[in-house]
Image (cartoon, rainbow, N blue to C red):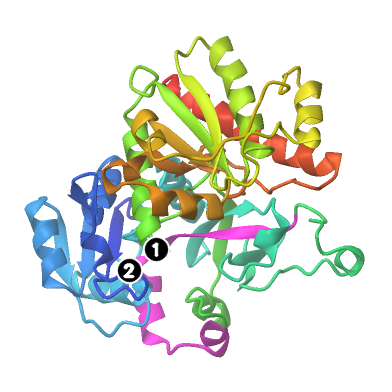
Amino acid sequence: MSDRVVLAIPARFAASRLPGKPLRMIAGKPLIAHVIDRARCFPDVDIIVATDDARIASVVESLGVDVALTRSDHATGSDRLAEVASARAWADDTIVVNLQGDEPLMPLSALSAVVAALRSDADASAATLATPILDVAEAFDPACVKVVCSLAGRALYFSRAPVPWARDAWARDRDVLPSDTLLRHLGLYAYRAHTLRRFSELTQTPLERAESLEQLRLLENGMSIAVRLAPESIPPGVDTPEDLHRVEAALKLQRLSASVVRKVMFVCLGNICRSPLAEAYARAVFSSRRLQVEVCSSGTSGQHEGEPADRGAVEIARLQGIDLSRHRARQTRTTDFIDCDLLLALDQQNLTDLSARCPSQHAAKVMRLLDFAPGSGHRDVPDPYGGSNADFARSFALIRAAVDGLAGRLAGG
C-alpha cells in the first residue's frame, strides 16, 4: 500500500459570493498563499493547487508550488481534483486530502485526523470530520451541514435539515437541544485516488442535487465515508469580505502575545449584559495570569448610555465573585479603533456593526469573541437581555470559555 499523501487545494476564481477570492489580499498576501503556508506545515506530503484560472496559477507558481490548470466547468471541487488525479496518473491508493482554497486557518491536527481516519478504515472510499452541535440555532441552520453516522463511524446521510429529528423533545420545545447526537459536518475530505476518479465518472445524483452536497454522490452510489470527530475547533473559512478581516486578525494574533496586545475591548449591543461580563471576567483572568493587558467594553448602540449593568448580569457576576456595581454603559467610539489592539464582538450583528464603522487600516483588530472558544460549536453569544437566570448562565459559560482561550493565546499557550 502506498504511503503517499497529496494535499490538493482546489481554487476557483469565479466564487459567487466573493469573486476572485483566492487572490484577495490578507495581511499583505493573497488568500491562496496563506492556505499554501498552512499546507507546508503538514509534513511528508506533496502539495498541488488545482485551478481553472491563469492568474491564480501564476501566483502559485511564483511561490514554488505545483499547479494544475483544469477545466472551468466542474460542478464541484472534488470533480476538479479528479481531473488532476487522472492527468497526473496518481496510484489508486494515493491518499488525496481536499484542503479547500479558502481555509487558511485549518488546524494541522485536523489534516492528520482525516488522513488517519482513511488509513484506519481500508474499506472506506473517503473520510471526513465532524463536531458536535452545541447550539440549537445551528441545528436548524441550512448552512450548517449535518451528518448522521452508523455505530461503526460511517456516514449514513448528510443534510442541511436538522437530522436526526428529535421528535419527542422538539414536539415540546424547539429551543432546546435534546442530546449530543447532532453532528456538524466539516468540509475536509480525504479520498483514495481511485475514488476520486470514480466520483468524476458518476453523474450528479438526485439527493446531491436536492441538498447541494457533493458527498451524497458517493453514498447514493454505495460507497462509504468514514467520519471521525475533529480533534479541535476548526475556524470558519472565507466566504465574505467580513471573513477576510476576521482571518487577517486571526493570522495576526497567532503571531502576537501580551507584549503586543495591550488593550482589548469587548463589544455587544447595549453594553449592559454580555460585554460587561466579558470585561469583568477578562480583568480577573488576565490579572491571575499576570497579563499586562487593559480591558474595557462598549455597545454598538447608545440606547443604554450611562446605565448600570442589567440585574441579570450583576447576579451572574456575583455568583462568580465579580462586582459589576460600578459599571456604566457607553457606546463604541471612533477613537476606540485607534486606542484598542483588539475589539471582540459578542455576536454576528455586533461584528457587522463594528466592521461597518471601523476605519480600513484597523480592520484586522475586529474579531468575534467566540473565535477564541475552541470546540464550543458556537459563533455567537446569545443576548440574555430580558431572559432568565439560566439564559445569563448559558451566555456567561460561552464568554468564560472564549476569554480563557483568549488569555491562553495572549500568554503564548
Q: Is residue 99 visible?
A: no
Determine whether, in the image, residue 408 is placed left or right of residue 36. right
Spatial CA distance of label 2 from label 1 is: 6 Å
Residue 18, label in figure: 2
Residue nearest the viewer, comparing 146 with 23: 23
Secondary structure at badge 2 equals loop
CB atoms of marks 2 and 1 within 8 Å: yes
Q: Amino acid at mark 2?
A: Leu
Residue 409 placed where, x, y %? 45, 27
Q: Is residue 137 above or below residue 72?
A: above
Residue visible at 23% across and 67% down in the picture: 50
Residue 216 placed where, x, y %? 54, 77
Residue 388 placed where, x, y %? 85, 44
Label 1: few (<14), some (14–19) or many (≥20) C-alpha neighbours in 10 Å = some
Residue 247 placed where, x, y %? 36, 47
Q: Amino acid at mark 1?
A: Asp
Residue 239, label in figure: 1
The magenta region covers: 181-210
Label 2: few (<14), some (14–19) or many (≥20) C-alpha neighbours in 10 Å = some
